[in-house]
Amino acid sequence: MEEVTLVSPDISCDHCIQAIRKALTALPGVEWVGGHPAAKQVTIRYDPSLSSLADIKRAMEEEGYSVAS
């Protein structure tokens, strides 16, 4: 398992975290998603052999949350 923290300037509240959690946990291998709205951060624990970081970023962007580089 790997864990990554991503920053999205579009995160503003707990609803945003819930929407991202729902989108990401639909991906294979995503075990856990947590977030901190004030910091505009989401942390994801996932199996990189099942979903890549690019898959995770794409799912967030498709949900309407850009990912800062």
Image (cartoon, helix red, strand yellow):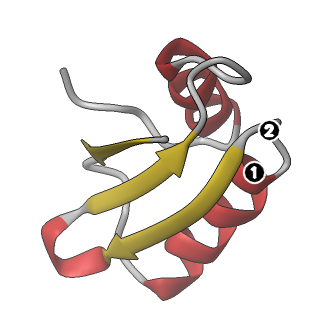
Residue identified by numbered label 1? 23
Q: Quadrant of residue 38?
A: bottom left
Which residue is pictured at 65% across the width and 17% down the height?
Answer: 49
Q: CA distance from mark 1 to mark 2?
A: 7 Å
Name the mark on residue 65: none
Q: Say whether residue 56 is left or right of residue 23.
A: left
Asked whether 1 or 23 is in front, the reply is 1
Extreme-front residue of the structure? 1
Element class at badge 2 = loop
Q: Is residue 12 above or below residue 33?
A: below
**Residue 7 seen in the figure:** no
Where does residue 23 sit, x and y in percent of width and height?
75, 51
Where does residue 20 sit, x and y in percent of width and height?
61, 58
**Residue 31 seen in the figure:** yes
Q: Is residue 10 above or below residue 58?
A: below
| Amino acid type of the residue tagged 2 in the rendering | Leu
Which residue is pictured at 14% across the width and 69% down the height?
Answer: 39
Q: Mark 1, residues whose alpha carbon is within 10 Å: few (<14), some, or many (≥20)?
A: some
Q: Say whether residue 13 is left or right of residue 38.
A: right
| Amino acid type of the residue tagged 1 in the rendering | Ala
Element class at badge 1 = helix
Extreme-bottom residue of the structure? 14
The mark lying in front, picked from 1 and 2, is 2
Asked whether 19 or 48 is in front, the reply is 48
Where does residue 64 sit, x and y in percent of width and height?
60, 41
Q: Quadrant of residue 35?
A: bottom left
Asked whether 30 or 1 is in front, the reply is 1
Q: Is residue 23 above or below residue 56?
A: below
Residue identified by numbered label 2? 27
Q: Are marks 1 and 2 in contact (CB under 8 Å)?
A: yes
